Amino acid sequence: MKGFAMLKIGQTGWIEKEKPKAGPLDAIVAPLAIAPCTSDVHTVYSGAIGERSNLILGHEAVGKIVEVGSEVKDFKPGDRVVVPAITPDWRSVEVQNGVPAQHSKGLLTGWQFSNYKDGVFAEYFHVNDADMNLALMPDSMSLEQAVMLPDMVTTGFHGAELADVQYGATVCVIGIGPVGLMAVAASTMRGAGRLFAVGSRAKCVAVAKEYGATDIVNYKQGDIVAQVLEATKGKGVDHVIIAGGGEDVLAQAVNMVKPGGSIGNINYFGEGDSLPVPRLAWGCGMAHKAIRAGLCPGGRGRMERLISLIVHGRLDPSKLVSHRLQGLQGVEKGLALMKDKPADVIKPVVLV
Ligand code: NAD
Ligand code: ZN
């Protein structure tokens, strides 16, 4: 079969591989829609997960099952399914400890696709533990909506969970690419009052307002901490969700969050050995400013709940889709769009 792969750090290309086989609990899926991600860009061009050779890329897909293992109970060939980016090994001690994304194989290893096994940018891909990791895709949901679930929706929503957004709270979302925009939508759903979105591109700003942002802060027009403090009369915000930016954003979040407030990070920090936390603004470690950070939750239960939000009209993630490409080969252009980020790109989708 054909797949679009990382050949080595900095280089991609099309390769041929054996079609994967299903173990007793597994499924083989043919993609219907896939989406390239900022994380694929980090994997290939920043060496985020180290050197890999001929690793098929991609972790965001919906597809049609072509084969299931002998022990799979709830799915059959022909079913259309949402496939989460994170497909934990549900028979693990880490799951019992409440962190299915962090396996004994190492940090973040609940993330399997395009990390330590081939990803979804191929004619077929392998899903471990199908009954626990797949969710049926309802007919009422479009492919564009569905393919935002495996990563963009679950990650942005996790940002709001990590920040523990409360009713009526003042929230700031730093970074409004597709993940941050879903954090805006999630904060709105969790009852945010005033909702700052930090971004600069007109298209993202417009969508942020549609998802519920009440105030826009442009990080290219001055210090965002000063802008947020001025707008809140020096008080700051109750919750910050970090979904973009470089090594300075954690310090900015600590500086703008109130004592007793909380910061949820879903951003990838790609540089340096450590991240600065401002000592005084953090109350010398005693300001009750919580910092929580995590990988997007995967698994069937999580996908089924997020599907319910779409099916019942509470969320339409297709507003993120800025580009539509046709055919598997479109993934090459899609990845280039995510890498170069022209101003009109939020998220490209490839309809296979
Ligand atoms: P993206 O690059 O499309 O969006 C990030 C946005 O932040 C961009 O629009 C960029 O212009 C903006 N930005 C850059 N510097 C900024 C600054 N100083 N202040 C405010 N905004 C700034 O990426 P995305 O796909 O939306 O993903 C966001 C982040 O989440 C990335 O770091 C990605 O790697 C990470 N991610 C994490 C998980 C997870 O499981 N935790 C999953 C997916 C993506
Ligand atoms: Zn992704």
Image: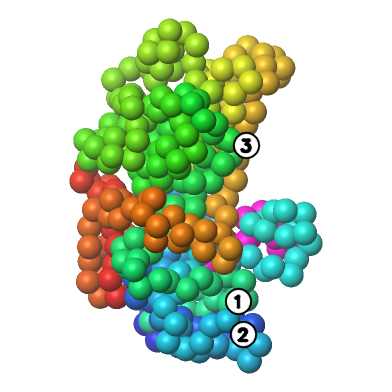
Q: Which residues are magenta?
A: 103-115
Q: Position of residue 95 (x, y in %)?
A: 73, 60
Instruction: Give the secondary structure at mark 3.
Output: strand
Q: Is residue 1 left or right of residue 350?
A: right
Query: In the image, is residue 56 above or below residue 39?
Result: below
**Residue 261: quadrant of the picture:** top right
Question: Furthest-front residue in view?
Answer: 312
Gap between marks 1 and 3 measured at Cα: 30 Å
Query: In the image, is residue 70 above or below residue 236?
Result: below
Residue located at (72% from left, 17% from top): 286
- Does 114 appear in magenta? yes
Q: Which residue is mark 1?
A: 131
Q: Which residue is mark 2?
A: 72
Instruction: Give the secondary structure at mark 2.
Output: loop
Q: Is residue 1 left or right of residue 90?
A: left
Q: Position of residue 254 (x, y in %)?
A: 56, 22
Q: Which quadrant holds the N terminus? A: bottom left
